[in-house]
Structure formats: structure tokens, C-alpha cells
Image (cartoon, helix red, strand yellow):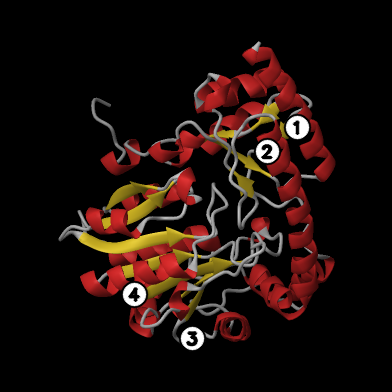
Amino acid sequence: MTKSVLARRVVELKPSGIRKFFDIAATMQDVISLGIGEPDFTTPAPIIRAGIASLERGDTHYTSNHGILPLREAVARHLNNLYGVTYNPNEEIILTVGVSEALYLTFTALLDPGDEVIIPTPCFVSYQAEVQLAGGVAVEIPTYMADNFEPRPDLIEQAITPRTKAIFIGYPNNPTGAVATRETLLKIAQLAEKHDLMVISDEIYDRLVYEQEHVCFAALPGMWARTILLGGFSKAYAMTGWRIGYVAAPAEIAAGLVRIHQYSVMSAPTISQYAALEALRVGEPYVQEMREEYDRRRQLICSGLNAMGLKTCTPGGAFYVFPDVSSSGMDDEEFAEKLLYEEHVAVVPGRSFGDSGIGFVRCSYATEYHCIEIALERMEAFLKRHRA
């Protein structure tokens, strides 16, 4: 054929920098991966048993497009207990195939061609891509190490144009581990009010916060009606493979999202919905246990990276650190590639998460403590060799 059969928006999508290095590492022996943002814990046993029990009961059919009502009710109670936000489980919560589908639904429902979404970066690789696939324009604004990678409201306001439809925030942040403070989020809320914008808040890491509080954006004064809240079970409950998340939004918005959801996936996997219900029922001790272990690893990797001269902010949440590797004399792409081939340690170049990530790499500490110790030893040997 002389012309491409693929849509331009698909052809122009950038490949994921995370997957590139993961695929290379998969072909090598003795690799310690600090690259993939996935808990190394297995889903807690009671949650697995609940999924198996749902199969044995014969719960192998479609559910309501919104998802099973008991889980929607449990999510509503969960959000109300944690953050004091109230959602009607009958019409304001949709269970989705992970937060990835929740992103797709949200941008597809909100954006007309050319509508702009402001996104602080570095950020998770799919945000800009999902905006592009929905026909919108992702407007990136940088965050800086000097600000602990918190978004600057003044830069957000400078980026607002007549085409701006929404501000997107994802905190705790992937890849930096930054946690946005209440003060910063209140200023973003003021901008949303002033310029009549929606705010899309990805709070998938809300339960993995250390030494400070997570602020739910929808709980801020006046923001419930302006917020589309995204959450899920993958990170806190070690349920990535179950592919179960949710959207919470005012009824009018949720009705638009569920129209797309019913034509694209029908309903989230039934077995996963019952497993998630059990996660909310009995999972809290497991969340606390995993968070304590992540915190132990967080302290190890931060101290180790700083000690070898790779300046690193202490992350407030999630399970990532984002060290500045410029002191190595290499850019982030070269650093990550040479470290993988020479020392068999996989990290992700910061540029994968937006231009403001250039010069940094993402290291995930969702891997065993002793593996992090070995990875740090290898990285130190790598730096000594290249700095000599």
C-alpha cells in the first residue's frame, strides 16, 4: 500500500521508554530491575481466595456496566472514611479495567479536537498519549528538583489558554515520588475556579505516602464538582494483574464516561471486582505492612544514591526515586543504557516522562531490599569506573 492505514494520531505516538529498557533487560541474565513500577509482593492470600471463590460460585458473567454494586458501595465508603468525600455508588462510581481505562474514558469523554490539558511533568508516560488519542493537546509544564518536583501554580496559570479544558495532576507522582502539599493543591483549586476548568486527579498511589498526608483533590473546598477522581487497587494491594480501578465523578460526568465504557469494554473483569471487594474488606493490614517495607527500601536507596553523588530528593510517596545523574558526565539515556549493559541494573531514562525529566533516571524500589543493596553496589562501581 502507498499510504498508511493507521491514523496519524497513532503513528505519531511515541513508544514507551519504560518498555524499551524492560524488553532489553528481559533478554539478559542476572539483571536487577529498578525499572518497572510494579509491586514485587504477591496479592495477599485472602484477596486471591475471594477471586477463586467468585469463580467457584459461577460469577463468570458480565456485570452492570458500572460494576457490581457491593464494590461500588465499598469504594464510596472507603473514600468517605479516608477523605470525607461523598459519592453516590449508584451513579457516581464506575469500575474500570485499571486506571489505564479510567484515563481513556476521562479524556475521550471530555475532549473535543484541539482541547488542551495542562500536565505537570515529569509524569507517567501514558498521560500525554491518552490525551493525543482522544484528539486533545497535552500542554506540559515542568516541575523542578528545587521544588521537590511539586507543580508550580504560576506556571500552570501561564499555560492556560482559551482552549484549556482541564488540569491533570497525578500525586503521589510517578516517576518522582513527589507528594503535592495541601497549600499547592489549594492554589491549583483556585485556578480551576478562576478559569472554569475541570481537574483530573490520578490518585492511584494515595495509600503509599510516608511522613505526610495525602490530600484528595475532590475533598478541597468547592472542588468536588470540578474533579474527576481516578483510583484503583494495583499499587497498594499488589493487584496489577487483576486490572481493576475506578472513576469517581459527579453523576452528569460519570454518565458520559459510562457510555464509552459500555461500548469499549462492557464491564471490568468480574473475578477482579470480587477480589477488590475483599481487598477493601480485609486488606488494610497488608497495605500497612507493604508500606512499611517500601519505606525501609526508600530510606536505603535514597541514602545510597546521595552517598555516591547522585543527588536525590527524598520521595514523599509511591515507590520511586528520581536521581539527577548529570554528575556522571552522561545524559540520562546513555547512563541507563550503559548501566544496563555493563552492570545489569535496569533504570528508566527521565526523558521518558517528559522533557523536564532529562538528566534524571527513575529507580523503582518495588523490589527486594537485598536486590536494592546489590544494585547500589553495582551503580557505585559503575560510577567509579566512568568518573575515573
Q: Is residue 64 above or below residue 139?
A: below
Residue drawn 36% across and 83% down?
A: 222
Percent across and percent down for residue 300 are: 76, 44
Q: Rounded to the nearest whole Å, what is the CA distance between mark 3 and mark 2?
A: 37 Å
Mark 4 and 3 residues: CB-CB less than 8 Å, in contact?
no
First in sequence, mark 4 or 1: give its number: 4
Mark 3 and 2 residues: CB-CB less than 8 Å, in contact?
no
Question: In the drawing, what numbered circle is on residue 42?
Answer: none
Residue drawn 57% across and 35% down?
A: 348
* Tag 3 residue: 87
Question: Can residue 226 be seen from the camera position used here?
Answer: yes
Q: Rounded to the nearest whole Å, what is the CA distance between mark 4 and mark 1?
A: 47 Å
Q: Secondary structure at mark 4?
A: helix
Q: Rounded to the nearest whole Å, what is the CA distance between mark 3 and mark 1?
A: 44 Å
Percent across and percent down for residue 238 are: 71, 59
Give the left or right position of residue 319, taking residue 117 as reference: right
Residue drawn 30% across and 66% down?
A: 110
Looking at the rendered image, the disc whose residue lies closer to the viewer, 3 or 2, is 2
* Tag 4 residue: 256
First in sequence, mark 3 or 2: give its number: 2
